[in-house]
Image (cartoon, helix red, strand yellow):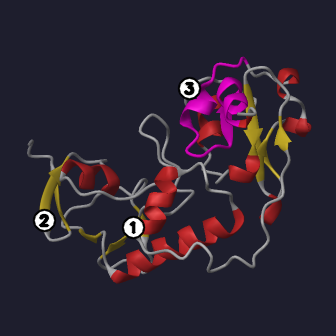
Amino acid sequence: MSDAAITLTINGQSVAVPPGTTILAAAKSAGIDIPTICYHPNLTPNAVCRLCTVEVQGARVLQPACVVPVAPNMVVNTESERVSTARRVILELLASTVDLHEAPEIQGQIAQFGADAARFAGGKQRDIPLYDDNPFYIRDYSQCVMCWRCIQVCADDVQFTYALTWGGRGIGSHVGTAFGEDMPDTSCVFCGNCVGVCPTGALKGKVEFEREHSDS
């Protein structure tokens, strides 16, 4: 490790990493797992889901590990009661509005943190129709956790196509196309990158979708 390395403490363990390293990457280098949803190693971290929040000594609020860089002598706790409670509530709120039956990783996180998926079950479910407007993939935004991955991979991070964007506000927020156009009428080149980075069943290849929904 070079002299320029930054030393910090994570869960009582001393860790040395290069300047500019995020808390998430520093923890990973030390074998410490921090759960994520919106983070993807090939995309720009965006701190949307906040599941990766950790407790940093001296900070007033929890810090999103995917975007906050390490600092000399920083003391981080990724498993405190405050952190676990925050993650549990985030997952419970997510489960109250999104169909997560095709999101095994998130279901595993719900079990890991003891989240009660039915705690806020009386809340309003997101009612968004399924879009089947092209021969390559379907868009079922009832399963969308709005992690931003598909928008990122479609735009500046990979494809530079800009076919996908945000739409709506509040409970009506959703991923969509500009002016609600059908996908063939957008700039989409059907590269499949958006399907590949989706952590749920919100974007799915047409062949897989039809196989799952065909009569047995």
Q: Nearer the viewer, residue 98 or 56?
A: 98
- Residue 176: image quadrant is top right
The residue under label 3 is: 158
The residue under label 1 is: 112
Callout 1 secondary element? helix
* Left or right: where 112 falls relative to 10: right
Residue at image point 29% right, 77% down: 57
Q: Is residue 194 magenta?
A: yes
- Residue 204: image quadrant is top right
Q: Nearer the viewer, residue 1 or 14?
A: 14
Which residues are drawn in magenta? 189-212
Please tell me how crowded label 1 is: few (under 14), some (14-19), or many (20+) other residues with Cα within 10 Å: few
**What's the amino acid at mark 1?**
Gln
Q: Position of residue 201 (x, y in %)?
A: 64, 43
Please tell me how crowded label 3 is: few (under 14), some (14-19), or many (20+) other residues with Cα within 10 Å: few
**What's the amino acid at mark 2?**
Gln
The residue under label 2 is: 13
Marks 3 and 1, how far apart at CA: 32 Å
